[in-house]
């Protein structure tokens, strides 16, 4: 059985109109979902290392490796895999003002070398924690 988006919307509107308790519950769920999506989205969407899509990052890294190691395909493959692992690690870093500044500076300077960005990021953040704890 298939429903169109319009028919689902009409069914929801009728149910919402006829069910007062359901209205309150649905509104609470809606508001809760919006807040959750907003805060989770902000935690990861602002990460400067992830402003470029994974496919674009892979393409840029591969182009860089092809020009640096033109006839060494094993080396290209090894660095590409390592770089994309580091891209995933960088993208998993939650957004905060200090991390964002460090990542932005490193990404602007070293993109698409994600292994280099990750190495310097870890070093910078370790020093930051030592200085500020």
Image (cartoon, rainbow, N blue to C red):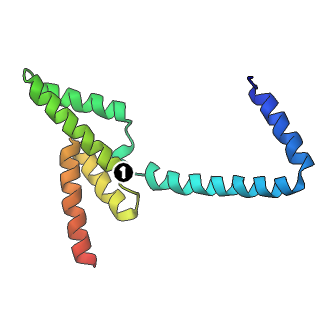
Task: Tell me which residue sits at (57%, 51%) in the image.
Answer: 37
Residue 107: % across, % down: 27, 47
Looking at this view, name the residue that lies furthest to the right: 18
Depicted 84 relative to depicted 89: above or below: above
Occupied quadrant, residue 4? top right
Relative to the observer, which residue lies in front, 117 or 85?
85
The reply, left or right, for residue 36 in relation to residue 54 is right
Relative to the observer, which residue lies in front, 84 or 95?
84
Residue 11: % across, % down: 84, 36
Residue 20: % across, % down: 89, 55
Q: Quadrant of the C terminus?
A: bottom left
Relative to the observer, which residue lies in front, 20 or 50?
20
Looking at this view, name the residue that lies furthest to the top: 71
Q: Is residue 55 visible?
A: yes
Task: Tell me which residue sits at (74%, 29%) in the image.
Answer: 5
The reply, left or right, for residue 35 in relation to residue 28 is left
Q: Is residue 112 visible?
A: no
Q: Pointer 1: residues within 10 angstroms few (<14), some, or many (20+)?
A: some
Task: Tell me which residue sits at (64%, 53%) in the image.
Answer: 34
Residue 95: % across, % down: 41, 57
Depicted 109 relative to depicted 43: above or below: above
Task: Tell me which residue sits at (20%, 33%) in the image.
Answer: 80
For mark 1, what is the residue?
92
């Amino acid at each position: 059985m298939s429903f169109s988006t319009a028919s689902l919307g009409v069914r929801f509107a009728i149910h919402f109109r006829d069910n007062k308790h359901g209205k309150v519950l649905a509104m609470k769920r809606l508001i809760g979902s919006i807040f959750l999506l907003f805060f989770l989205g902000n935690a990861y969407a602002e990460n400067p290392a992830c402003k470029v899509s994974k496919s674009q990052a892979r393409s840029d890294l591969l182009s860089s490796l092809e020009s640096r190691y033109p006839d060494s395909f094993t080396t290209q493959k090894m660095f590409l895999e390592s770089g994309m692992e580091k891209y995933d690690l960088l993208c998993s870093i939650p957004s905060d003002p200090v991390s964002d500044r460090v990542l932005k500076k490193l990404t602007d300077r070293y993109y698409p070398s994600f292994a280099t960005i990750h190495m310097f990021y870890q070093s910078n953040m370790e020093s930051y924690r030592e200085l500020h704890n």
